[in-house]
Image: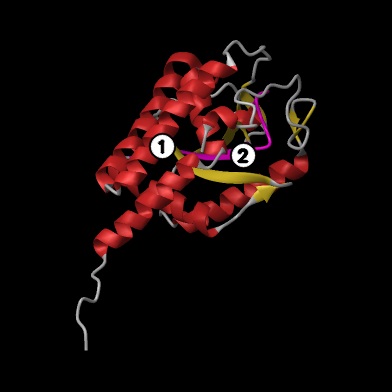
């Protein structure tokens, strides 16, 4: 895929929040009701005794002015007292849940996450669905990053993804996936949601590049763990 030829706006911007979710910057009651039901279902799915749930939040582009047709709703269960083993369990169950259930709010996909309360979460806007109020209200700012810079960064990582997949080397593929995660984390920590790194990551995700790599890693893992029948009658 040639990132230069993408028709997706790498840095979408609006002068109002998504009207599907918000009404005068307040979450629509029917949206909030459904998100709370989804959160309850996810909690049941986790099946973790004494889960210390502190909040249920919505963040990301759907809680700001840079949403697009490729945006999803990032719904976070904010949980306290999470250790490393819990994080691994939550990540595995989150991935399985998002794979098993295709959930949406008026055609906007809903993605579930478990967020340790002790870890800082970077987002231009953070809304407490549980408390029905803004924790961090997004600011309306005009984009300052050039689309060319975003596409150049995305094109570089698209080439890395394709090269890793052509190698059929699971370690190289995992290495690129880890690099992509570090890319986004570094961008969010230094420049926020409007950083070149975060916007490049979102562009790659919107075009299916990251999901393609994730599925290929799963395929290589399955092959590595399988034993083919080499015997003939």
Q: Which residues are magenta?
A: 64-82
- Classify residue 116 as left or right of residue 128: left
Toward the bottom, the furthest residue is 233
Q: Position of residue 102 (x, y in %)?
A: 60, 55
Q: Residues within 10 Å of mark 2 (few under 14, many from 20)?
A: many
Q: Look at mark 1 in the image and give the residue it sits on.
A: 80
Q: Position of residue 162 (x, y in %)?
A: 40, 40
Query: Helix, strand, or loop for circle 1?
Result: loop
Is 99 magenta? The answer is: no
Q: Look at mark 2 in the image and give the residue it sits on.
A: 73
Is 69 magenta? The answer is: yes
* Front residue of this view, candidates 2 and 132: 2
- Classify residue 6 as left or right of residue 113: right
Give the distance between the C-alpha atoms of the residues marked 2 and 1, in whole angstroms.
22 Å
Coloring scheme used:
secondary structure
Q: Is residue 121 at least partly visible in the picture? A: no
Viewport quadrant of the C terminus: bottom left
Q: Earlier in the sequence, mark 2 or mark 1?
A: 2
Q: Position of residue 197 (x, y in %)?
A: 46, 22
* Front residue of this view, candidates 22 and 106: 106
- Classify residue 185 as left or right of residue 134: left
Magenta region, main secondary structure? loop
Residue at figure coordinates x 25%, y 59% from the top left: 224
* Front residue of this view, candidates 20 and 168: 168
């Amino acid at each position: 895929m040639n990132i230069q030829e993408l028709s997706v706006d790498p840095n979408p911007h609006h002068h109002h929040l998504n009207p599907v979710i918000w009404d005068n910057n307040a979450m629509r009651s029917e949206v909030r009701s459904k998100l709370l039901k989804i959160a309850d279902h996810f909690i049941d799915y986790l099946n973790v005794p004494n889960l210390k749930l502190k909040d249920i939040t919505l963040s990301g582009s759907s809680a700001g002015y840079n949403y697009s047709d490729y945006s999803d709703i990032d719904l976070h269960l904010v949980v306290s007292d999470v250790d490393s083993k819990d994080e691994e369990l939550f990540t595995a169950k989150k991935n399985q849940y998002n794979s098993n259930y295709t959930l949406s709010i008026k055609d906007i996909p809903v993605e579930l996450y478990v967020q340790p309360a002790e870890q800082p979460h970077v987002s231009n806007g953070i809304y407490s669905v549980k408390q029905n109020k803004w924790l961090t209200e997004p600011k309306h700012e005009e984009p300052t990053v050039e689309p060319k810079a975003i596409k150049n960064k995305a094109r570089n990582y698209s080439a890395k993804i394709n090269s890793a997949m052509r190698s059929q080397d699971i370690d190289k593929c995992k290495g690129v996936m880890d690099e992509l995660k570090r890319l986004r984390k570094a961008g969010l920590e230094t420049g926020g949601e409007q950083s070149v790194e975060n916007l490049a990551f979102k562009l790659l995700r919107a075009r299916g590049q990251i999901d393609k790599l994730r599925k290929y890693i799963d395929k290589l893992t399955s092959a590595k763990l399988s034993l083919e029948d080499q015997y003939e009658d």
